Image (cartoon, helix red, strand yellow):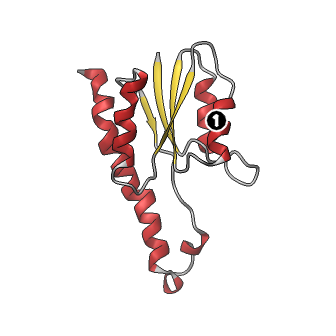
Amino acid sequence: MATVLVSGANKGKDAQALRIGYGFVQKYLARPNTTVIGTVRDPSAASFKALYDIPKALGSSIILVKVESTSETDAIEAVKSLSTFGIDHLDLVLRNAGVVKLAAFVPVADLKIPDLMEHADVNAAGVVLLFQTVLPVLESLHS
């Protein structure tokens, strides 16, 4: 049984956006005997609920947990909650969550520091936070 964590799992379902997170979830759920753990920023979003409707191969399932990339506690709480689903290891982590604000892609002279910091918080610090949290669960495969 493979266990895959996809961050930013519900993004990209609409035609306007890239389908990366949603596409990863679809791809792994199409594999037999695969558990996909999808992280989402907003569990009240319609795109969150739509993840449950993705077709699943025999023996595959999805678990959805809330993780806001800039939160220092969300990933910790999400990983702790996995034991309630019988998850004790991860085979693969796809850190897909991120932010792109066009306001941050301007000449440096015009760049607003809050836009720059949002990118750094989500796209750099968020990667480190998730890695630090899931490392022990990834390492449990080798112990």
Q: Position of residue 33 (x, y in %)?
A: 54, 15
* Closer to the camera in the image, 102 or 68: 68
Describe the element under mark 1 as helix, strand or loop. helix
Name which quarter of the figure residue 76 lies in: top left
Q: Which residue is pictured at 38% across the width and 44% down the height?
A: 75
Q: Which residue is pictured at 55% across the width and 50% down the height?
A: 42
Residue under label 1: 51
Residue 107, compared with residue 137, is above or below; it is: below
Q: Position of residue 43 (x, y in %)?
A: 56, 45
Residue 86, compared with residue 139, is above or below; it is: above
Q: Which residue extends farthest bottom?
A: 109
Q: Which residue is pictured at 50% across the width and 86% down the height?
A: 109
Q: Position of residue 1 (x, y in %)?
A: 47, 15
Left or right, 46 with respect to 125, comes to right
Left or right, 33 with respect to 117, comes to right
Q: Which residue extends farthest top?
A: 58
